[in-house]
């Protein structure tokens, strides 16, 4: 190995880990416990708080306590930002 290649390898590993962390996503299902007054933050019955960005098409009227939802989110700056959000129909 050439001199200095260790630093390059460490930088590449750090870059890959940063990109991987930025694209990490998770799924969650639950029942809405509450919705803030702006309709942007939904709290599920398990305590999970999801922020719904303005750009995400969600029927705000359907965001009611007791509604079952399924969402995918990414963690950004300590917040769970929804990338998809669906209110499930009652069975």
Image (cartoon, helix red, strand yellow):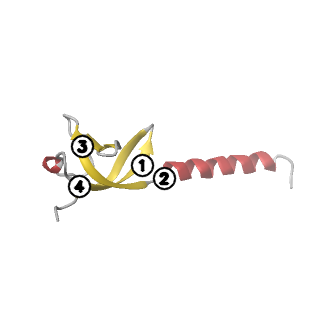
Q: Is residue 89 left or right of residue 76?
A: left
Q: Does dot 2 land on a helix, a strand or a loop?
A: loop
Looking at this view, is 60 or 6 the one in front?
60
- Can you give x and y, in whole percent of width and height, for residue 30 in the image? 29, 53
Mark 4 or mark 3, which has the lower sequence index? 3
Q: Return the residue at label 3.
A: 33
- What crowding class fits label 3: few (fewer than 14 Cα within 10 Å), some (14-19), or many (20 or more)? some
Q: Name the quadrant containing residue 39.
A: top left
Q: Return the residue at label 2.
A: 24
Q: Residue at x 22, y 36 (%)?
A: 36
The CA span between labels 2 and 1 is 6 Å
Looking at this view, is 55 or 3 the one in front?
55
Q: Return the residue at label 4.
A: 68
Q: Does dot 4 land on a helix, a strand or a loop?
A: strand
Mark 3 or mark 2, which has the lower sequence index? 2
Q: Is residue 35 left or right of residue 81?
A: left
- Name the quarter where the N terminus is drawn: bottom right
The CA span between labels 4 and 3 is 10 Å
Mark 1 or mark 3, which has the lower sequence index? 3
Q: Return the residue at label 1.
A: 74
Q: Are marks 3 and 2 in contact (CB under 8 Å)?
A: no
Mark 4 or mark 1, which has the lower sequence index? 4
Please say if 68 is above or below 77. below
Q: Are marks 2 and 1 in contact (CB under 8 Å)?
A: yes
């Amino acid at each position: 190995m050439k001199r200095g290649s260790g630093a390059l390898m460490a930088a590449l590993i750090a870059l890959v880990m940063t990109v991987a962390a930025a694209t990490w996503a998770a799924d969650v299902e639950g029942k809405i416990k509450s919705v803030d007054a702006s309709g942007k933050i939904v709290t599920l019955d398990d305590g999970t708080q999801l922020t719904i960005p303005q750009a995400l098409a969600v029927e705000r009227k359907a965001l009611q306590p007791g509604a079952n939802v399924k969402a995918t989110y990414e963690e950004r700056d300590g917040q769970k930002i929804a990338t998809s959000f669906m209110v499930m129909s009652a069975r």
